[in-house]
Image (spheres, rainbow, N blue to C red):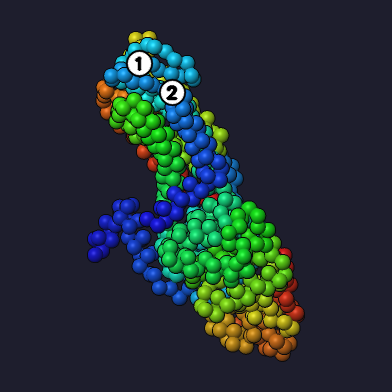
Amino acid sequence: MMVTVALINDTFREALARKIFWVLFGLSTLLILFFLFLLRIDIVAGATATVSLFGRQTNANPDVERLVRGVYGGIATFLYTWGMFLAVFASAGLVPSVLEPGRIELLLSKPLSRTHILLGRFAGNVLVVALNTTYLVLGVWTILGVKTGIWSPAFLISIATTTFVFAVLLSVVVLIGVWLESAAAATMITVALMIISPILAQTSLMMRLLSSEWSRNLWRVLYYSFPKVYELGKMTLDAIQSRTFAGFMPIWTSALFGIAALGAALTIFAKRDF
Amino acid sequence: MSNFREFSLRNKYWYYCVSWCERNARVDSEFAIETRDLTKVYISRWKRREVRAIDGVSLKVRHGTIFGLLGPNGAGKTTFVKALLSAVRPTNGSALIFGRDASLPEARRPIGYLPENHRFPTYFTGAGMLDFYAALSGVDATRRKKLIPENLELVGLGHWADMRIGKYSKGMLQRLGLAQALIHAPTILILDEPTDGVDPVGRRQIRDILTGFEERGVTIFVNSHLLAEVETLCREVAILHLGKVALSGKMQDLIAGKGYRLTVVHPPEALAEELRGRATSVAVRDGMMDFQFPSRELANGAMDLLRAQRCEIEALAPTTSTLEEVFVRTVQK
C-alpha cells in the first residue's frame, strides 16, 4: 500500500510540476466562478421570474428545473468534449516521462513489479483527473443548488462517467506511451479514437448504407471493439436531462477495451529491456 | 515422484512452476551476486543484425567485498549491471542475488543502486527524492523521517535538503544518488560510475563512505572506468571485453608487481593446484591461466613441471603491473 501511495503521489507531484494539475484546476475554477457571479436566477414561487446572464435579463418564464438540467447537461457535454481533450493532452507525457533512460532503471531496481509501477502511474493519472472533475462538478452543483434550490443528484453521475471514459482513454495513452515512448503519438491516436466514436455510433444508418455483408460485419466489429465515448456522453446527458438509461452495453464494451489496452501495455512493459 | 516430474516436464506451465520453485528455494547463498552463463543478445529491428552485448558471463561476488567491474566502452558492463537489476531480460543464463533469481522483485530488496546517467525528477527536493525512493524500497514513514536527514548529512548535503534538485550541481546529484542508494540500509550496493562528476575531495569522501559500508559487511559492486579509483577501492575485479570475462581475480593478485607472469593453456587440475601453491597470484581467463611468480627461479621451476607433463605454455613475461597495465594488456590481447 505504501508503495502504491508513493507512486500515486509521484504522479501528482509531476502533474503539479508540469502545471497540468494547476491548468485543469484553474479552468475548472473559472467555470465555477462563471456560475457563481455571472449567472443570476431569481425564483418566484418555484418558477424563474428572471434569468440574468452577463448582466442582461430575460423575463421568460421557463420551468426552472428544466433550465437547471439544461445547464447541467451543457456542463456534462463540455466535460465530455473539451474537458476530455484537455485531460488527454495533459496526461500524455506522464507515462513516457517515467520510461526515460536513467529514471526507469532506478525504478526497476526497487523491489516492486513492473505491473505495480505502471498501474501506480495509471492510478495517479486517473486520480489527478478525477479530483479535478469532482471539484468542477461538485462546485457547479453546489452553486446551482444554492441559487435555485434544486438539487439534481443525476448531475453527479458525470463525475463517474467522465472519470471512467478518461480511464479507458488513458489506457490507450499508456499503451502507445509504453510501446512507442512518444507522448505525441499517444495523444494523436487517443484523440483519433475520440473523433471516430460518434462516426462509429451511426451503426443503424451504416447498416442501411453499406452494401456488402462483410463490410457491415467489419463495421459492427469496429463499433463493438472501440470505446463508446460518444454513447457514454449521450447516456450521461440523457440521465441528467430526462433521467433515462439506455443500457449497459457501452459501459462494458468500453471497459473491456480499456482492460485489453492496459493488459497489452503491461505485457509490453514487462517484456521490454531498458 | 518420477511420474510427477515427467508430467511436469511435459507440461510447460508446470515446468515453469517447478523451475521457479527450485530457483527460489535457495535463498541463502555463499555469494551476494552470482551469474551463470549470462548472455544478452540484442536483435536489431527487422532481425537483420545480432549484437551479443554479454556472452556467457559467469561471475561470483562474495559477501562483504568491494568488487570492481572494468571494461572498455561497449564491453557490456552496463548491460551486465542492468541484467542484475532485471532492467534487461537475459537471452540465456541467470543472474542471482543472494541465491534468488534477480527477476523477482523481492530478490532486489537488498540492493541499493546508483545508475550511471541518472535522471532524477527535478520536481523533487533532496529530502523529497529520498522519501520517494525509500518508500519504494519499503521503508516506513517513521524510519524515513529519521533516515533522510542522516543520509543527507552522510553525503554532505544536510543543508540542501529542502532545495529543488534542479538547482543541484552534477557532483551534488551524484552524492544525492548515493544517499538514495543507501537510504534503505541495503546489503548490496551496485554503483555505476559512483564518482562521475564529483570533485577530488568529494571522491575521497565517497571512497571513505564505501569503505565504511564494506566494514559493516555490505557487498559493493562498482562499475567504473576510473582505473586508479578501482585499484584503490576494490578487493576483487573482473575485466569485461567484447561481452566476455577477459580476466578476473583478486586485486592484489592481478597487480602483483615485479616478477614473471606465466600463461598456460588448460593445465591439468592437479598441476594447476601445485602451481597455485607456488605462485603469488592466479588469474583465470578464457581457457588459460596466468600464474604470477615473484622470481625467475620459481617461474623456471614451474616451466619445468609444465614441460614434464607436456603442457602448452602460451607466454612468459616479466611484469611490473598496475591495474592500468593489466587492463590494457587484457583488452589488447
Which picture quadrant has residue B71? bottom right
Q: Which residue is identified by label 1?
A: A49
Kindly identify the residue that appears in the image at 48 percent across and 19 percent down.
A55
| B93 up-or-down from A122: above or below | below
| Residue A94 image position (x, y, % from top left) | 51, 42
Which picture quadrant has residue A213? top left
Question: With B169 as the anchor, is A70 left or right in this view?
Answer: left
| A38 up-or-down from A108: above or below | above
Task: Tell which circle, 2 or 1, labels the residue nearer the N-terminal end.
Answer: 2
Query: In this orientation, does residue A17 appear?
Result: yes
Kindly identify the residue that appears in the image at 60 percent across and 74 percent down.
B209
Q: Which residue is identified by label 2?
A: A39
Q: As rendered, which of A233 and A249 lies closer to the eye?
A: A233
Residue count near mark 2 (Cα–Cα under 10 Å), binned few <14, some 14–19, many ≥20: some
| Residue B121 image position (x, y, % from top left) | 57, 52
How far apart are the alpha carbons under marks 2 and 1? 14 Å
Task: Say what amino acid the circle numbered 1 marks.
Answer: Ala
**Label 2: chain letter:** A
| B284 up-or-down from B240: above or below | below
Position of the C terminus of chain B by quadrant: bottom right
Determine whether label 2 and label 1 are within 8 Å by CB.
Answer: no
Q: Which mark is residue B37?
A: none
**Label 1: chain letter:** A
Task: Say what amino acid the circle numbered 2 marks.
Answer: Leu
